[in-house]
Structure formats: structure tokens, C-alpha cells
Image (cartoon, helix red, strand yellow):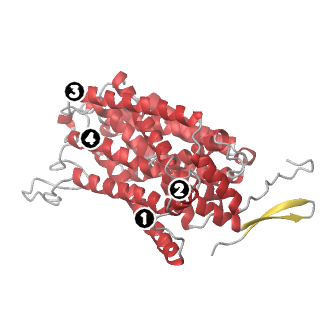
Amino acid sequence: MHRNGHRHIPPVATVHEFTEDMVSRHAATGPRYRRAMLILGALFLLGVAGFVARALQDGFDDRLPWGYFAATVAYLMTTAGTAPLIVIGMRAVKAHWHRPLARIGELYGASTVLILAMFIPLLFLIPSAVNRRTLYFQSDGTGVPGTLGRIPGAPQVYDLVLLAALVAAGVGLLWVSSRADRAVVRDHKGQSPGNWRGLLRQWKVHKVGLGLLGATYFLAAIGFISLYSIDFSMALVPGWRDAIYPAFQSISGLQGGLATVLVTMYLLRKYGHFEQYIHMEHFWAPSKILLALCLLWFYFGWSTLIIYWYGRQPVERDVLQLLMFGPYEWFFYGAFLLCFVAPFTTLLWNSVRKSTTGPALAAAFILVGNLFDKLRLYAGSWSVPNEQINFHGLEGVPLVHYPDLLDVLMVVGGISGALFLFLWMARRTPVISLWEMSEGLRLRVVRPFLRTRLTVIGKSE
């Protein structure tokens, strides 16, 4: 701040200065980066060892031992897997502040490869939808009224197809977006820039490709989160019928994706020394969206609770006991506190939002709360015995299934694997988009106004 109370506006770098600085940063590998890669890689390998040990010890006949692993897949999908959605949405509305965080969100698209690898074993633990109360309304083909007959491959095939489309769109989005930047990096190394020449025709194809891949990623992400929440949690609990549950999980995914981007951007600014390019405004603007998502999280959660609370049927009481007020109540209380109460009260004040630390702190709360939320949903639903999933209601609330060492290894290893992929891909392409930041620098100028200086931003189109 200046002495007259006005906010300090850093000088605007030229495109040449920015490009030279970013290319030199990308070429260097500091000790912190190598240390982080070593630690995350070791934790990921421990997670793989935990998965192998679980498979050898318990096999794939019983779902109960795999509840925390299923929760990890859901957590990765609603944090790292939804981070690109933030960039896609802000790019669609041409928000100027999204430029420094665009590549951060796109880099997390690579984590969908890990999500796919972790998802495939879960397919063997879910029974067919035939003669079960699922989204597919199917029977064994004998013409039962109110059903659609036999639907081949449900639910496994359709979930897998959606996730495969998500992986293709996520990897493709990162490849298309970073193509120009990779050509610049190769050119500075004295190598051939490849097929990229920066022609007008190539930029038009680039723009259309980002739009199509972004739309595909959005549809696949929301679709997979919805189907996964239905087929891998709600359909496994007899008596649990909630029309807004998939939408609730999608909102949770948007909240977790934005929180992931904010925390990563804060760490990149603090430890990567990108203060010159990541400013307070890049936290202030998304913090308003994060505040709205906290309110939406409460609204959908309250709507879920109030219907069962006032219904008070034995079946509904058992569902509430299993997922909220019974064996996994502390996970529920932790999720409510960290996904709504703590971030809401933090972001409620404009002075906190108008900083770099406040939004990052609220985002960190949400990431922990999101994990608690997935643990109570999936550990609880996967504790229901297989012979009960076709019943009208629960035959007693299952006891709490505490995580053992293998569960801890798989949860920590899965999260570490996603972060490892992020850092690994960050060595293949600049962590801040060169072409988007260069476009923003050309549209940005600092001009004097009365006794202060203001940033003037032009429209890109």
C-alpha cells in the first residue's frame, strides 16, 4: 500500500521480458521441485504397494475393504479432475483474471489418467444393474412392468465410456493449449518448433479446438461425477433415493476444483516466486465464486437432509444414521464445518477476500472437508452387505469400518500420485500459459489517474 492508502500496482512487464523470464524459469529445476517429486513419488509407490497388498489380502469379492479406495477416486475426481472446469468456464466468459491460473487447471487434467487407472478395479466390485434399484430401471428381460428390460453392460460400461471421454478431453485440452508454448520453449533451446508456426489459420484451429475440447470435458466431467455418485454409492444403499444427490456432488466438484486451483496458485506464487505475474486480483475475483459455491454446497446439503429428517420413516432414519449421524458422524461434521462454515465465515469479509492468503486458506479448508465428505459417503455405502442392496431398506445400520494401514496408504498414495503427475507435466510445459499471458499483457496498461495509478484493460474481442 502507498502512504495515501491506494493499492500498489506492480509495473507491467513487456511480452518479451515475460517470455524470456518464463522460459528461463522453465529450463531450471530447483531443489524444492526435485525434493517434492521425490517425496510424492515415494508416497505414490507406497500407495501402489498398499493397493497390491489389499488385492492379495482381500481380493475383489467383498466391497467393504475397498470403501476408502472408492472414496479416494471420488475425491480426486471432485478436486483435481474438476480443476480444468474452472479454466474452461472463465475462458468462455473471457474473464481477464483467469490467465495466470489457466495452465494450472489444465495441468490437473493429466490426473484423469490416474483416476481412470484407479477406477478400473472398482468395476469388478459393483454388481450388474439387473433387477436392482438403479438409475437404469432394468430387469432380467422377462418383461417386468416399469422397467426397460435388459441393458447390456449397465452400469460399468457407461461409466467407463464417460471417464474415457473425460481422459481424452483432458489430455487433449492440455496438449492443444500448450502447443504454442512448447514451440516457444523448443525455439529458445535452438530446437525446431515443430509444426507450429503461429499462423492465423493455426490460431483459429487452436481457438476452435479449445472450445470443443472444453465443452466435451465439461459434459464428461459432470456426467461421470453424477453416474459415479449414483452407481458407486447411492445404488448400494437400500432406501437411499435422492434426486438432487448427483447435482450436490457436481457442486462439490466445482467447489473442490476451484479450491485446488487457488491452493496451487498460492503455493506457486509463494514458493515459485511468481509474485510479478500472480497478483491479489487473481485471488480476489475467484474468491467471490468460491463464496457462492459454499452457499450452494449448504443449500444442496440442507435439501438432502431436510427431506429425510421430516420423512422420519424407518428406512429414511437408517439412511441418515448411516451417512450423517451414525458411525460416520465425525466425517459428516468435519465436512459441514470445513466445506461450509469455515470457508464461508472466512470469505464473508471483503478484506479477507481482497488478499492472497484469505482465499487460499478458505480453499485449504474445502480440500480437507471434501475428503471428509467423500469418506463418509463411500466408506458408509460400501459397508452395506452385498446381499442387502436389493432390499427395500437397511436391515440395521452397519458398524463403522475404520481405515487400516493399507487404506491410509492408498488414500495418501492416490492424492500424491495426482500431485506427482501435475509436477511431472509442469516440466513438459510452462506452468503459466505463455500465449494467454502475452495476450493479457498486450491488453493491459497502467495509467495515472488523479493522485493514483490505475490498471486499464482492453477487450480481447
Residue 304 can be seen in this image: yes
Residue designated by label 3: 56
Residue designated by label 1: 213
Report the mark closest to the observer, 3 or 4. Answer: 3
Q: Disc 3, disc 4: CB below 8 Å?
A: no
Mark-to-mark CA distance, 1 and 3: 39 Å
Residue type at numbered disc 2:
Ile
- On residue 86, the disc is 2
Residue type at numbered disc 1:
Leu
In the depicted view, which residue is nearer to us: 38 or 345? 38
Mark-to-mark CA distance, 2 and 3: 39 Å
* Callout 2 secondary element: helix
Residue designated by label 4: 122
Mark-to-mark CA distance, 2 and 4: 28 Å
Q: In the image, what residue occupies the spot 28% across and 47% down?
A: 231
* Callout 4 secondary element: helix
The x, y position of residue 407, in whole percent, is: 35, 27
- The crowd level at tag 4 (other Cα within 10 Å; few <14, some 14-19, many 20+) is some
* Callout 3 secondary element: helix
- The answer to which of marks 3 and 4 sits earlier in the sequence is 3
Q: In the image, what residue occupies the spot 71% across and 51% down?
A: 279
